[in-house]
Image (cartoon, rainbow, N blue to C red):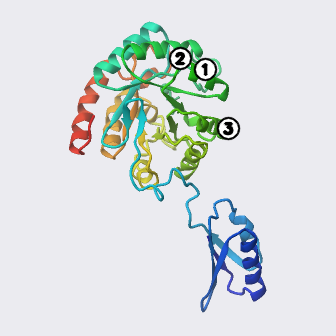
């Protein structure tokens, strides 16, 4: 931290800041310029709130130097991390496409979906059993039955599963069904108690960006999971709220290079919840891979117009297959495997 003192600061005020830093177990480096005195605080100051110092007499402002996140930061971990989902790498050279319906509906729907996901060449399957719906009167997901249908269908076709966890009370059930990847949805990105719990389990986590979260807030949420011991985190950008009404959310492709610079962890994009319309998905998916995303989370339904949830944005199995072909071309140009 750097503490910039006011132009009219007194020696007593400088001394008081020095004393305060010592009390906080930080060393002080006082530098007296012609116009200003600045004090450098030396040591790990992440636990200290800037207000503690900003409110002292003679202090003009306090500037943080250290990033507030540590484990997820690239600063202390220069190489890209690969998160293994069983034998499937997320990150590194590989580009992974996770596909499947928004919600689990019936065993038949799941079996057809899993077969289509597999046939398209995707290596992981998604499907929501616990759904965070805006209205309490719409389909809320099948709950535990949904996990059963999802896992049965995916296992039959050799696919690991990704599904959303909304409540810590469901965590044991997720473990019972041996869910491969826990998804934390946009609405729960800052549900800190939930983040702490998934931080304690040995399971990869896809952390979606809160719909109005800054990148720093998102990184801090990942740090919550990492601080509990679980470092297998995958960031997922899914669009943020904007003034625009022509699409569901505004896909922040810029988040990809920014996150790649800030964290060593893999970054994927969900083009489905961003565009909100199936016809937008291929363009957003291509942009995501071209921008350097490590994968995608895409909604696909065997019969989109019959989907119980997010029907507008689901690709058909044929559209998913065609999209995979296009993405393979982009991945190849970038020297990546898909
Ligand atoms: C989902 O993936 O089905 C979902 C609800 O996504 P989000 O949390 O991004 O809205
Ligand atoms: Mn959905």
What residue is drawn where x is 74% and y is 66%?
A: 52
- Mark 3 sits on what residue? 193
The Cα–Cα distance between marks 2 and 1, rounded to whole angstroms, is 9 Å
Please indicate, yes or no, whether residue 302 appears anywhere in the rendered image: no
SS at circle 2: helix
Residue 110: x, y in percent?
Answer: 43, 13
The Cα–Cα distance between marks 1 and 3, rounded to whole angstroms, is 18 Å
Residue 329: x, y in percent?
Answer: 21, 37
Q: Is residue 188 left or right of residue 258?
A: right
Look at discs 2 and 1 and give the one toward the viewer: 1
Name above or below for residue 10 compared with residue 189: below
What residue is drawn where x is 59% and y is 35%?
A: 198
SS at circle 1: helix
- Mark 2 sits on what residue? 147
Contact between marks 2 and 1 (CB within 8 A): the answer is: yes
The disc at residue 173 is 1
């Amino acid at each position: 931290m750097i503490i910039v003192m006011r132009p009219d600061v007194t020696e007593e005020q400088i001394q008081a800041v020095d004393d305060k830093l010592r009390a906080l177990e930080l060393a002080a480096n006082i530098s007296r310029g012609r116009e200003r005195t600045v004090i450098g605080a030396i040591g790990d100051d992440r636990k200290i709130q800037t207000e503690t110092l900003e409110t002292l007499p003679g202090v003009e402002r306090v500037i943080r130097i250290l990033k507030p996140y540590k484990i997820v930061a690239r600063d202390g971990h220069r190489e890209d991390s690969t998160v293994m989902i069983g034998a499937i790498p997320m990150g590194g050279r590989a580009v992974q496409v996770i596909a499947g319906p928004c919600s689990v509906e019936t065993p038949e729907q799941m079996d057809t979906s899993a077969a289509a996901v597999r046939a398209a060449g995707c290596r992981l399957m998604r499907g929501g059993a616990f759904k965070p719906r805006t209205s309490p009167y719409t389909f809320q997901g099948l709950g535990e039955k949904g996990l059963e249908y999802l896992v049965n269908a995916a296992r039959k076709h050799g696919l690991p599963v990704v599904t959303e966890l909304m409540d810590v009370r469901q965590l044991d059930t997720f473990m019972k069904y041996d869910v491969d990847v826990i998804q934390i949805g946009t609405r729960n990105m800052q549900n800190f108690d939930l983040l702490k719990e998934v931080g304690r389990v040995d399971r990869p986590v896809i952390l979606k960006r809160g719909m109005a979260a800054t990148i720093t807030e998102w990184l801090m949420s990942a740090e919550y999971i990492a601080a509990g011991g679980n470092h297998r985190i995958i960031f997922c950008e899914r669009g943020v709220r904007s003034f625009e009404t022509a699409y569901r959310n505004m896909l922040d492709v810029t988040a990809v290079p920014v996150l790649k610079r800030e964290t060593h962890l893999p970054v994927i994009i969900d083009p489905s919840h961003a565009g909100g319309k199936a016809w937008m998905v291929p363009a957003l998916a291509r942009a995501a891979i071209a921008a350097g995303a490590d994968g995608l989370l895409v909604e696909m339904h065997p019969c989109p117009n019959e989907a119980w949830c997010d029907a507008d944005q689901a690709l058909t199995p044929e559209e998913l297959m065609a999209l995979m072909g296009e993405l393979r071309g982009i991945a190849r140009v970038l020297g990546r495997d898909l």
